[in-house]
């Protein structure tokens, strides 16, 4: 835990960094009162033990079958994925009747954990999240107004909630832990729940296909190593800079960034190129942070994957601008 905290939010080299405004604005909100000494969560909090008294979670490798009746031969109503939560309606000696989303039925007791164990498993597998409601909310190293500030996050940012310490949430952003004032964070509903077996398998296939795409992009032309967070960042800056351009125009922006990585005059990673001082206006304006917090559009992801794969309609261009200019024109932009 201490190691994560000390990482503090050396987060600027990663995707989550785009959500963190390290120069904390004067209007960053934080109620000026001390934190309570208690570690208890309010009764209505998803983090509270009382919120899990009538909940269970699937303690299995993949998923547990929900059956229409209490018996192995009964028809399958759906599946509860690993760690997903369900409301306990009735608990018998061998079977538990549950309601999970739109699906109700029975799960074998030995496939479930209950109460605090269910909360811990859900937190481990899926995470309990919250959404920042203030225009900007400070991050601190400790749950105290006297603790050093380590950044701020904009409104709408989702953060992982680890626990509560009085008036403070302990949060995790990109494997780094910090504290935020709880009054300005709304806890999200538990999202992981039951689905049909067909829906589960389809989702698994889609995730496997995406993993394959990301693996294929791990090493691209010019030996540039990338990760899933690099892909997210590249797609987001493409949307900011060329969201209204053609597919080729979007790929062209991605190609400029890849060209810079290979050029000795520029940094050698996507995040360092994008966040290099004075280079991309969406970074300074906050537009990039907003896109990252919501997720870039799929057409921008497609363009990013092509650029990572070596597609390059702009040759050795290292710059671009809108309107009139020199170089290669694609849509409303010139590349040179």
Image (cartoon, rainbow, N blue to C red):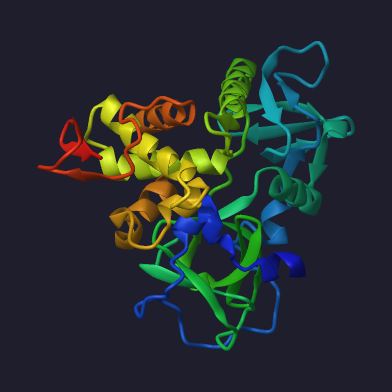
Q: Residue at x 33, y 43 (%)?
A: 318
Which is nearer the eye, 171 or 57? 171
Q: Can residue 46 be seen?
A: yes
Which part of the image, by quadrant, shows the N terminus?
A: bottom right
Picture coordinates of residue 223 (x, y %)? 58, 34
Q: Residue at x 74, y 27 (%)?
A: 63
Quarter of image, res 147: bottom right
Which is nearer the eye, 61 or 300? 300
Q: Can residue 42 be seen?
A: no
Q: Is 240 displayed left or right of 273 in the figure?
A: left
Residue closest to the far front: 264
Q: Is 84 displayed left or right of 316 in the figure?
A: right
- The vertical placement of 212 against 329, above or below, is above
Which part of the image, by quadrant, shows the C terminus?
A: top left
Q: Is 84 displayed left or right of 96 in the figure?
A: left
Quarter of image, res 116: bottom right
Residue closest to the far left: 324
Picture coordinates of residue 286 (x, y %)? 33, 59
- The vertical placement of 268 against 227, above or below, is below
Picture coordinates of residue 66 (x, y %)? 71, 23
Picture coordinates of residue 7 (x, y %)? 66, 66
Which is nearer the eye, 26 or 75? 26
Q: Tell how many labels.
A: 0
Q: Residue at x 54, y 48 (%)?
A: 189
């Amino acid at each position: 835990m201490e190691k994560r905290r000390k990482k503090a939010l050396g987060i600027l080299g990663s995707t989550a960094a785009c959500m963190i405004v390290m120069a904390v604005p004067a209007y960053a909100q934080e109620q000026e009162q001390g934190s309570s000494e208690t570690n208890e969560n309010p009764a209505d909090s998803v983090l509270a033990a009382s919120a899990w008294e009538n909940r269970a979670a699937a303690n299995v490798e993949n998923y547990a079958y929900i059956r229409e009746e209490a018996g192995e031969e009964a028809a399958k109503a759906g599946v509860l994925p690993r760690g997903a939560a369900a409301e306990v309606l009735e608990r018998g000696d061998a079977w538990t009747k549950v309601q999970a989303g739109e699906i109700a039925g029975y799960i074998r007791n030995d496939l479930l954990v209950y109460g605090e164990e269910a909360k811990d498993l859900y937190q481990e597998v899926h995470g309990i999240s919250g959404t920042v409601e203030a225009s900007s909310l400070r991050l601190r190293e400790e749950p105290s107004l006297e603790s050093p500030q380590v950044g701020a996050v904009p409104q709408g940012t989702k953060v992982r909630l680890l626990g509560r310490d009085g008036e403070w949430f302990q949060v995790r952003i990109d494997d780094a832990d910090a504290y935020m004032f709880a009054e300005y964070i709304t806890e999200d509903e538990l999202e992981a729940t039951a689905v049909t077996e067909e829906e589960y398998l389809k989702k698994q296939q889609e995730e496997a296909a995406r993993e394959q795409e990301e693996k294929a992009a791990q090493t691209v032309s010019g030996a540039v190593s990338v990760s899933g967070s690099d892909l997210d960042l590249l797609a987001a800056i493409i949307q900011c800079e060329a969201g209204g351009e053609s597919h080729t125009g979007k790929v062209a922006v991605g190609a400029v960034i890849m060209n810079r990585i290979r050029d000795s005059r520029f940094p050698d990673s996507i995040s360092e190129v994008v966040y290099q001082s004075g280079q991309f206006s969406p970074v300074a304006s906050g537009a990039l942070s907003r896109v990252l917090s919501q997720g870039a559009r799929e057409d921008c992801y497609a363009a990013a994957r092509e650029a990572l794969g070596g597609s390059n309609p702009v040759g050795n261009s290292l710059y671009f601008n809108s309107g009139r200019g020199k170089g290669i024109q694609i849509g409303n932009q010139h590349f040179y």
